[in-house]
Image: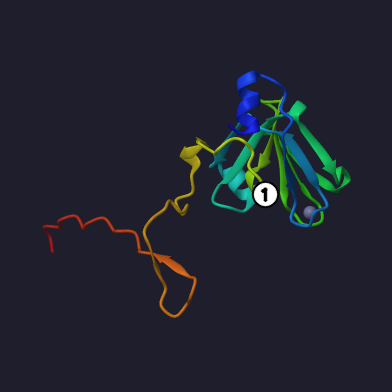
Amino acid sequence: MDRAARSAKTGKASAVQAEGRCACGAVRLEIDVPAVWAWHDHSAASRHAQGGAYATYVGSWRSRFRILEGADSLTRFEDPDAGTARSFCARCGTPMLYERARSPKMVNIPRAVFASRTGREPRYHMHLHEKADWTYEGEALSPLKGYPGVMRARPRRKKPLAPDGMF
Ligand SMILES: [Zn+2]
C-alpha cells in the first residue's frame, strides 16, 4: 500500500505532496496527495483557453494547495459572466489555475503541469455536450508513408447515400 492510500485509510493528514510547475519553471505549486478528484473538461471555454481538444484538471481543496514560487509571475483572467478565473504564467503562458465561483473552496490545476502522480486518475468527464467533434478518441491509426512518426486516422466513414429514386 502506498503512503497516499494508507493516509486515506487512516484518515490522517497527507504527508505526501505532488509538485507542479509551468514550462519555464517560474511558477511552482504543490498539492497534498491525494487530490480530491481529476476530470476532463470538454467545455468550449476551457478548450479555447487551454488551446487543446479538452483540458484535464486535478481538483484540490484550496487548503491543501500552495504556491511555492512565482506567485507574482501569475497573470489572471477573470470571466465575470462565466464566474471563472484562469491564471497562467506571464512568462511562458502555461495555464496553472482554474477557479470557479461555484466551487470557492476548490482550485483546479491542469494535470499536465504535474510530473508525478496526484493520487487520482482522471475518470470524470464534464460538459461532454460541448465536446469538439475533432477530439481524438482512440480511432485506429496507421503510419503515414514517408513521414516517420506521423500516424494517420482513416477518414471517417461517410453515411451511405440515401437511395434516390430520381437518378
Ligand atoms: Zn512559466
State the quadrant of the C terminus: bottom left
Quadrant of the image containing the N terminus: top right
Whether 124 is drawn above or below 20: the answer is above
Q: Amino acid at mark 1?
A: Ala
Residue found farthest to the top: 11
The structure residue drawn at horizontal position 44% and vertical position 67%, both measured from the top left corner, is 151
Residue 60, visible in the rendered structure = yes
Q: Nearer the viewer, residue 7 or 44?
A: 7
From this view, report whether residue 102 is shown above or below residue 51: above
Residue 34 visible in the displayed image: no
29 with respect to 125 (left or right): right
The residue under the point 62% across, 53% down is: 51
Observer-nearest residue: 120 or 104?
A: 120
Q: Which residue is mark 1?
A: 115
* Residue with the most extreme left position: 165
Relative to 9, does residue 165 appear above or below in the rendering? below
